[in-house]
Image (cartoon, rainbow, N blue to C red):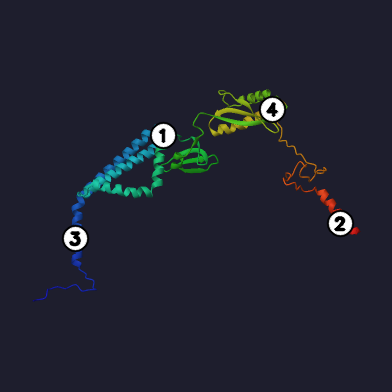
Amino acid sequence: MQAPQGNPDTTGQIDLNPALALERVDSWLDGFVKLLPNLAAALVVFVVFYIVARVIRSVIYRALNSRDRSNLGEVLGGLFKWIILILGGLVAATIVVPTLNPGDLIAGLGVSSVAIGFAFKDILQNWLAGLLILLRQPFQIGDQIEASGFTGTVTHIETRATIIKTYDGQKAVIPNSEIYTNAVLVKTGEPKRRSQYDIGIGYADDIDASCEIIKDAISKIDGVESDPAPQAFVWDLAASWVTIRARWWTDSQRGDVVANRSNILRAVKLALDEAGVDMPYDTKVHLFHDQTEEVDGDRENQREGWPAPKDDKTPKPRYQVVEGKSKRSKSKADG
């Protein structure tokens, strides 16, 4: 029997076959050349989808921007843009690889989307919360709100967070999920806002006359609403004064609220001074107990201290104990 021709494989030796490598590269090139028409068609289709996505995004943005809802236009426009681009990518992939089934690809994406959802849970939650905020509009751009411990003016609502410019000039970035799930105080949600301040007058002053003076002084300030009119109520009988609570309505913008409050307090102070109404200081009375009476230290009779024991073992007053010690010391000295 004759041995086979050729170089047999040797254990532990790397076999190099340039011809086989060139054949493999040649097959790849042949496959690529065959796919060139499909790749060109897929590229054209994807470009068309891209242009359509840009146009739809622009149309949505312009339509909502004309209604002063530019933030919603950005979010919805971006959403539809990416949906169209993903759809275009799937169509282009089926053109390049005709055997590819889009249904299987979508099913695979559906399974992997569970892991993606867990990984990007916070991002998706903030995005959805931002979309709901823009759709329902609990507040708008330019509103002054209080949320998550920050108070300021809403400057922008993004897909992830709401931007607030605080009153001291800082920028607060609050995640949309926090704003959507927690309580938000919209200070400019209504055109008017009520403010109040407590004013103390002396007990000897005329309460009704003081209330009229306060209401009249407030009503003369520019920016204070006449309907509802300013009010003044007796609110508390404090230790040193009678408290009158003044209430008034102004524009809900913080600048107007602060400026009017300053003018009102100044006007009320001057009006009460001119009318001779006392605005007393805090008065305190201190009572000092004289602990020199004869029952000092007697647990059964003294006014302050511990209660009397129930076993009749009442401690003796200090002076009796001191006096007894002195007598015993003296008798020892004499003896």
Task: Say whether disc 3 or disc 2 marks the residue closer to the N-terminus.
Answer: 3
Q: CA distance from mark 1 to mark 3?
A: 60 Å
Residue 25 in the image, given as x and y percentages of width and height: 21, 61
332 in relation to 307, above or below: below
30 in relation to 248, above or below: below
**Badge 4 is on which residue?**
272
Q: Are marks 2 and 1 in contact (CB under 8 Å)?
A: no
Per the image, label 2 sits on a secondary structure element best described as helix
Per the image, label 1 sits on a secondary structure element best described as helix
Q: CA distance from mark 4 to mark 3?
A: 102 Å
Q: Amino acid at mark 1?
A: Arg
Per the image, label 4 sits on a secondary structure element best described as helix
Task: Say whether disc 1 or disc 3 marks the residue closer to the N-terminus.
Answer: 3
Q: Amino acid at mark 3?
A: Asp
**Badge 2 is on which residue?**
329
Q: In front of the other: label 2 or label 1? A: 2
Residue 263 in the image, given as x and y percentages of width and height: 62, 30
Q: Are marks 4 and 3 in contact (CB under 8 Å)?
A: no
In the image, is 68 to the left or to the right of 147? Answer: left
In the image, is 276 to the left or to the right of 140? Answer: right
Q: CA distance from mark 1 to mark 4?
A: 48 Å
The residue drawn where x is 62% and y is 28% is 246
Label 4: how many residues lie within 10 Å, few (<14), some (14-19) or many (20+)?
some
Residue 285 in the image, given as x and y percentages of width and height: 75, 37
Camera-side residue of 52 and 184: 184
Which numbered disc covers residue 26? Answer: 3
Camera-side residue of 136 and 310: 310
